[in-house]
Amino acid sequence: MSNTTPGAQQPLLAPPAARPSGPRTAARSHAQTVRGLLIKIALLGIVDAIALFAMFILVMREEWLVFAIAAVVTVIINVIYLRPGWLPAKYLAPGVFFLAVFQIFVVGYSGYIAFTNYGDGHNSTKEDAIESIIANSLTRVPDSPTYRLTVVEQFGTYGFLVTDPDGDTLLGTPEQPLEEVDAEEDSTGKAVSVAGWTSLGFGDLLANQSIVVDLSVPLSDDPNDGALRTPDGSSAYVYTSDLVYDETADTFTDTTGGEVYVDGGDGSFVNEAGRELQPGWKIDVGFENFQRAFTNEDIRGPLLSVTLWTFAFAILSVASTFVLGLFLAIVFNAPHMRGKKIYRVIMVLPYAFPGFLSALVFLGLFNEQFGFFNQVLLGGASIPWLTDPWLAKFSILFVNLWLGFPYMFLICTGALQSIPEELSEAATVDGAKPFAVFRLIKFPLLLVSVAPLLISSFAFNFNNFNLIYMLTGGGPRDIEAGVDAGATDILITLVYKVAFGEGTGRDYGLASAFAILIFLIVATVSIISFRQTKALEELN
Amino acid sequence: MKVTSRSFTITGALAMSAIVLAGCTAPAGEPGEGSEEPQFEGSLTVWVDADRAGVLEDAAAAFEDERGVSVELVTKDFGAIRDEFITQAPTGNGPDIIVGAHDGLGKLVQNGVVSPLELGDKASEFQDVAVAAMSYEGQTYGLPYSVENIALVRNVDIAPEAPETFDDLIAAGQAAVAEGAAEYPFLVGLDPAAADPYHLYPLQASFGAPVFEITADGTYDPTTLALGNEGGEAFAVKLREWGQAGILNTNISGDIAREEFVAGKSGYFLTGPWNLPAIKEAGINYAIDPIPSAGGETATPFVGVQGFYISSESENQLAANEFLVNYVGTDEVQTALYEVGGRAPALLSAFEAAQSDADVAAFGAVGAEGVPMPNVPAMDVVWSDWGSTEVAIINGQGDPVELWRAMVESIQSKITG
């Protein structure tokens, strides 16, 4: 819930206060030290045991970098907790550890993704891509028969002992094409063993399955006849491949047309005509994603209008919720009003509901034909609240006002109540009118405490994904625009669309680049605003 | 306070190590039990949704008994499996087998995360449309288990006769509205922002305008759009006409359409078997008909197929293949999957057995005319442009033919890059 209301992601952490220990008797203190030490050693031991196990697995997997990091972190944690003193480090270590894992690493990794072409079609490494291309290019010869198969082994060489549809028994290995042999057959006529070779049972097959599924036994000396392969170890089919990989030249050759596909430098194999083989692989592309964001017509146009609307949305949301919240706070701060508590509780209700739920409720209320607004309030009018570009923008702002004003109401009430009454009394005695008292005394004092919250509220609304996604999904879409960007899309929903591809396929690289741009914008605005706030404080 | 802070660290370290370990879990399998054969040390991991998991438990138990390989079923949300699998597979931590709908196959192949599955002679035991749907660029990748499609559900009390053509349907529907027997001439769930090209497709197809050209081997050619042919434009003109006449209404979402039909407010509802339980519950006297043609040709719906895929990163290709083909591709399992999901089985013998249910038979008859929904990755582009253009046409914005042409141009430019 806290993520769905403006400004609610305020850090509310207070630094842990180190309490000075009170006077104790020496004996008690000593007993505590021993017990504490024992607990400490036991718990550290558990941590170390788990860390060692993790490191052991990392070594097995040859993940040297992660291993080194894990080793260093383990040593540091041990030193911190075993060494006397270093009290701040003992408190900070867990937090720093989690900060590193869940924030710094994640942010750093997203940043790195912005410089790659990670996305649909560029999902893994080049080795994986080559393997997939080879596997996908193998096709079973149409209408070819099924060979009944026994996989056999001799001195580490695996071979296929097959019974062809005519009942002949044949033996072959990847190097030696099929040749007729005399073999023992079972009651169904299937060849099950041959002299000099060991037949593999199902358990052997499973134990060697990666070898078995890669076996390819040519039918004859002519590679165009195809080769036998087995998907299950008990039957073999004739496959031909129309793509041959040349390891030394790093190229694929199409055996039917003779076309050569080379590594085009964009993370895929391409031929001269520009046709790409799928899948490609992930490569580093430098600043290409950022370049694309600014130079590609299809992206730049929507990006500009979306950025403008994001600013308009964030500023208008903060302004409207603040004005309404402040107004209500002043009204409900009037000393003579009755039933204030009840009103206050009622007003906090929109804040108490989960924001996405409210958005969904409003989605129903705004339905052009069946919605409450058109049906009941407007007597059956058909106003396209969410499907007209401008009305949709208005609806978004309206719903955000509904969701956001209680927060502003709360903070303004708090701030107003903390302004000493004497100030306004003194001003009144000096002859100031009530409005002048508010404008010249209360409001500036209010701003000192509220301004930082307004800035954080701006930053929150700048990335207010839930509301937009739930209410309009960024729509209505401009059907003439190239990119799937709608009239109410803000930057973060555009990033979502680019990253998770509701339209053009996932493009994590470009989405991460956008995310970095958003960060730069929000950071700049925040820094400038906080500077201004400081100036405000100094004036007072 | 000191101790608290420390135990916090330790809990954290434990949690962290657990995460690291979970990421590194080497396949831990059954140790050999004194047999002479070298025992296979490993297990199959299957990502499956909750409904399917219950059924697969039996197949998994049988597989473990007979083949000695344990199968671990991991329950996940059906719709989330594909994307999570694409991200996880390259890290080596993905499963061996996943469940998924066939329209995501193109994306799986594009990302190189599934490996071909040779059904062998078993291919002929499945419905042709199911195997075709599980194929991409001439290669079969999955074991199908169910087939679904939409059809015309008719409220017999309001519309006693099945319409011959879509115009008949409109005439009968409007007559029912005029008499006060119904409130809507026709219902289909649309979305105010994206219409619903899937549900409207049969009508479009009856004008002879599929999405892509179909190549000689029966698969789609994702580079040649067929949307923009004359039939497509004729369909666009009709969409406008239906929109203005109130036959199609983008404010009627899938949920509203179902509610209104269940309330007996319309004679016709274009929908799939997933809405039948609600219709039965409401006691509507219904019949399931073929979709009437609007443009003269047969109104063929898209057929959606669900199936299982094997990961290209799986170390257990052979075991996974064995499990799918011989333990999931069986009569019992396919029938059990049909019973929990309500979708017709893909295996012919199970499909025929399911024909005893009149609803399955009726939907199946309509689906027999259908074509698999295209599974090429380019469909993502198509759906989004297609839907928003249909909305604009239905709601009377701009010239229908021009909008349709602009859409085709936009899709074409995105496909060719």
Image (spheres, helix red, strand yellow):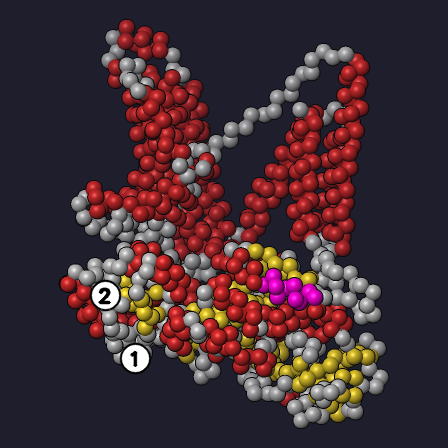
Give the number of the disc on residue A390: none
Q: Is residue A341 above or below residue B247?
A: above
Element type where label 1 sits in the image: loop
On the image, numbered disc 1 is attached to which residue?
Answer: B297
Mark 1 closeness class: few <14, some 14–19, many ≥20 residues within 10 Å: some
Q: Earlier in the sequence, mark 1 or mark 2?
A: 2
In percent of width and height, residue B378 lies at 44, 67
Q: Judge by depth and name the residue closer to the eye, A481 or A77.
A: A77
Q: Is residue B365 left or right of residue B284?
A: right
Three-letter amino acid code of the residue under disc 1: Glu
Q: Is residue B380 inside the magenta stretch?
A: no
In percent of width and height, residue A212 lies at 71, 74
Q: Is residue B324 above or below residue A501?
A: below
Q: Judge by depth and name the residue closer to the eye, A307 or B188.
A: B188
Tell me the chain of label 2.
Answer: B
In percent of width and height, residue B1 lies at 66, 24
* Residue B293 seen in the current view: yes
* Residue B373 seen in the current view: no
* Residue range (magenta): B56-65
Q: Residue at x 61, y 83 (%)?
A: A240
Indicate the quadrant where residue A461 lies. top left
Quarter of the image where the N terminus of chain A is located: top left
Three-letter amino acid code of the residue under disc 2: Ile
On the image, numbered disc 2 is attached to which residue?
Answer: B158
